[in-house]
Structure formats: structure tokens, C-alpha cells
Image (spheres, rainbow, N blue to C red):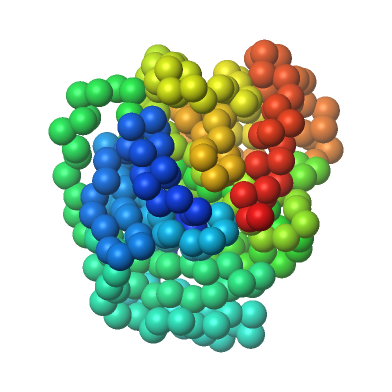
Amino acid sequence: MNNTWITGLASISLEVTDLQRSTNFYTEVWGMAQLGEEPGRRFFRCVEGAPVALSLRQSTLARLESLTLLARDATAVHSLHARVASDPAVRVLAAPGVLTGEPGKDYGVVFEGPQSLRIVIAVASASTPLAQVADPTRPLCLTHVVLNTADMPQLSAFFTDVLGLRLSDRTDRMDFLRCGTDHHTVALAHGSALSLNHAAFKMRDIDSLMYGAGRLLDHGYIVEWGLGRHGPGNNVFSYFIDPDGFAVEYTTEMEQVGEDYETHFAEYWSAFPRRPCRWGIARKPSERMMRAMAGAAKT
């Protein structure tokens, strides 16, 4: 049975060291649209998906601030609040109610989970596609986020046992978790501390991904890893590094899974041919990408 409370990933919030520089990157280069702003913070959306896909806040350090998961409805918000409130590893920051401070969040709950991971669970207001929908080179939505963690079992158990996500696959270094038919919405990677490994944005198809990557090359950003097709998830990928050192991915063709999907574990994936690129083209990430994925943007 698919998750009955959480329906997807809405947005990620990042702290950045130069808000205008990051704004220029995510609009002119990455292809998002600025939706609005508050003092020291700006909001961005993709062509489709949730009203806000990315929130950036001016800070002295570049680091992950929070992520927002979409709730089915207000009843789901209350059900999840009851579950997290009874967990000793959780600190509720805002009880269920009307959320302020970001467009598109009608109602939700805010809490700090294990390892100080701040999560917002919200019912999003309806949004209409941008006029840019005719431009196939722009990202459709934020499709998944990968987090580094020093305690994989703790965080993985929290997402599955408390929030209701399901384990799709487990490799020797990552857990892939889903809340719908996409193979993964949140993934966890072994790391030294909680940090952002990367944020992935869905493109319409491989052609759109390639045109989008071409735009980044035109602006002086190189492909740090890819083009390739992943092992777990089967999605096509192309990775870049933003001005603050965050790893960001254009992706498409994520594997769609159903109730009969068989979870595979480390032994299976260790023997899988040509992992992590099924095509055998992408090889290894660049040294810069490996540092970025390890959470180098935190410092």
C-alpha cells in the first residue's frame, strides 16, 4: 500500500552566502522562475509541481535549512503530527495550522526530527503551470532529495516507521525511499553528518535534459557527472554544482514502481552490472562533485 499521508516532495530550503548570485543561477541558468520574496529570502518554482520548489535564505554559511513534504490533506497533517509528537527524537516547532512565510503552503506542521533535520509537512495550494511550459528546457518539478547522514538506521527508520515512506532499495551506501510510484522521493546516503547530498529536478525527457545541460554549459558550468542512467531508480542523470557548492541534478525517466515491486539489498546491487551507470558511460563523478555530495557546501 502506498503512503496514505504524504503524496510527494514539495520543496527544499537552502541557506546561501550570496542571495543575488544564487537567484541569478536558479533563474537564468537552472531555469526556474522567482515567485516572490521576503527580507533575506526568495522563492522559486518550476514549470509544474508545488507552488514553491526552492527557497533560498541569505546566510553566512551555505547549508540545508529544511525540506517540505506534501500532505494529502489536513487530516493527514494531524495524523502525522500525532505520530511525530510522540517521538522523543522530534521537537515540534509549529503545531498544525495555517503556515505563513512562504507562498503556497496553506496548512501544515513544522518539526525538527532526528539529527536536527527540519521538516515541514504541508497541504499545498493549487498552482497553475507557468507560461514557460512551452520551453522544454526548464525543470518540471523538484522530484527527489538525497540527504547525507551519520546514522542511516535512525533516519531511515524515522522516514519509514513514523512518516510512512517505503523502502524501495538499499545499496551498500544508500537507502531509497518512496511515497508514491516514483522509485524514490527521499534517499539517504552514509556521511559524516546531516547535510544535503543533492537535489534533483525532473526534466520532461532526455532531449529536454540535454538542452537544459547545454544552457548550463553556455553559462560556464560544466557537467560534473553524467550523462548516465542510474542503477537504483533507472533514471537518467546529469549533475552540476551551484555557486555555493550544492550538487544539483537534472533527471528524467525515473522508474515507476507498484505494489509488487521487490526490494533489493546491498548484495544484489553490488553484483549489478555497471552500477552506478547502467550505460557504462558516466563513470565516476568529478572530485568537485564528490566533495559537493559529501556536504562540502556546509562550510
**Where 250 falls versus 120 (above or below)?**
above
User: Which residue is nearer to you in this view: 195 or 85?
Assistant: 195
- Identify which residue is drawn at 58% across, 67% down: 117
- Identify which residue is drawn at 35% across, 66% down: 122
Residue 14, position as x, y percentages in the image: 48, 55
Residue 38, position as x, y percentages in the image: 28, 63
Total marks shown come to: 0
Relative horizontal placement of residue 287, taking residue 123 as reference (left or right): right
Residue 176, position as x, y percentages in the image: 63, 46
- Identify which residue is drawn at 79% across, 34% down: 268
**Where 81 falls versus 136 (above or below)?**
below
Quarter of the image for residue 97 reads bottom left
The quarter of the image holding the C terminus is bottom right
- Identify which residue is drawn at 76% across, 63% down: 151
Quarter of the image for residue 238 reads top right
Residue 169, position as x, y percentages in the image: 67, 43
Relative horizontal placement of residue 62, taking residue 107 as reference (left or right): right
**Where 122 falls versus 51 (above or below)?**
below
Q: Can residue 190 be seen from the camera position used here?
A: yes
